[in-house]
Amino acid sequence: MANEIPDLECQVRAGTGKGAARSARREGMVPGVVFGGEADPLAIQIPFNKLLKMLKAGRFKSTLWNLKVEGHDDVRVICRDVQRDVVKDLPTHFDLMRLRRTSLINLYIPVEFINEEESVGLKRGGVLTVVRPEVELVVTAGDIPEKITVDLAGKAIGDVIHISDVVLPEGAKPTIDRDFVIANISAPSGLKSADNEAEEEAAE
């Protein structure tokens, strides 16, 4: 289970409809709505600069958030849509969806590499090249893994680690069907040249 789900602090928005949304924008807010679950839709708003900063940081729509709204219980949500101005490409409205513990969502989960000291390839001076420091998985909202672990014990130079080589948390699966590469252990440049010279000598 992930230790920390980031908070998303919003305010209740007075009124609904286009007039109320325009009023929120004039006050430097981006109007939004929370829907889904067993509760009624809730009109909310968030400071424009705050939302813009989070959008620029990336992964806003693939992050599970702990929504905090004064006067309401905290609830887990995921962003379903951010509408933008067609000319300025700036956010004008956002939709959040409440999640049940059994809801399936796509999230980026960080990859941790362990037992580097037990890797034959790394002991010989090989270099661990990480292709995917995080992997997008389909997980249940109530059981989000903190990370996935790649064991490097026994890995040699030239070894390639695919997603199929990793034991995923129960109930989680990659969003990509193909067996993609997570990392590989490549030879250091000095070793490569020595190997090439050996091959050339053998060829002669």
Image (cartoon, rainbow, N blue to C red):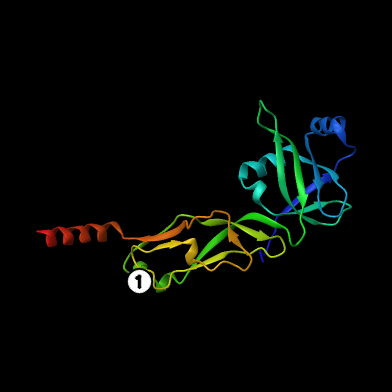
Quick one: quadrant of the N terminus?
Answer: bottom right
- Residue drawn at the location 71% of the way across and 36% of the way down: 83
Number of labels in the image equals: 1
Residue under the point 67% across and 55% down:
105
Q: Establish if 126 lies above or below 118.
A: above
Relative image position of residue 75 (x, y in whole percent): 80, 56
Looking at the rendered structure, the secondary structure element under dot 1 is helix
Residue at 47% over, 66% down: 165
Reply above or below: 44 against 20: below
In the displayed structure image, the side of residue 68 where residue 62 appears, left or right: left
Say which of 54 and 137 sits in front.
Answer: 137
Measured from the top left, where is residue 160 in percent x and y? 40, 61
Q: Nearer the viewer, residue 179 or 25?
A: 179
Q: Which residue sits at x=80%, y=53%?
A: 68
Residue 110 x/y as whole percent: 56, 59
The image shows residue 8, relative to residue 109, as above or below, that is above
| Residue 37: quarter of image | bottom right
Q: Pointer 1: what residue?
A: 120
Most distant residue in the left direction = 204
> What x and y, as percent, mark residue 139?
65, 60
Res 24 → quadrant = top right
**Extreme residue in the front direction:** 177
**Residue neighbourhood size for the residue with mark 1, other residues' Cα within 10 Å, grouped as few (<14), some (14–19), many (≥20):** some
In the rendered structure, which amino acid carries the disc numbered 1? Val
Dividing the image into 4 quarters, which one contains the C terminus? bottom left
Quarter-of-image position of residue 136: bottom right
Left/right placement of residue 168 relative to residue 144 reads: left
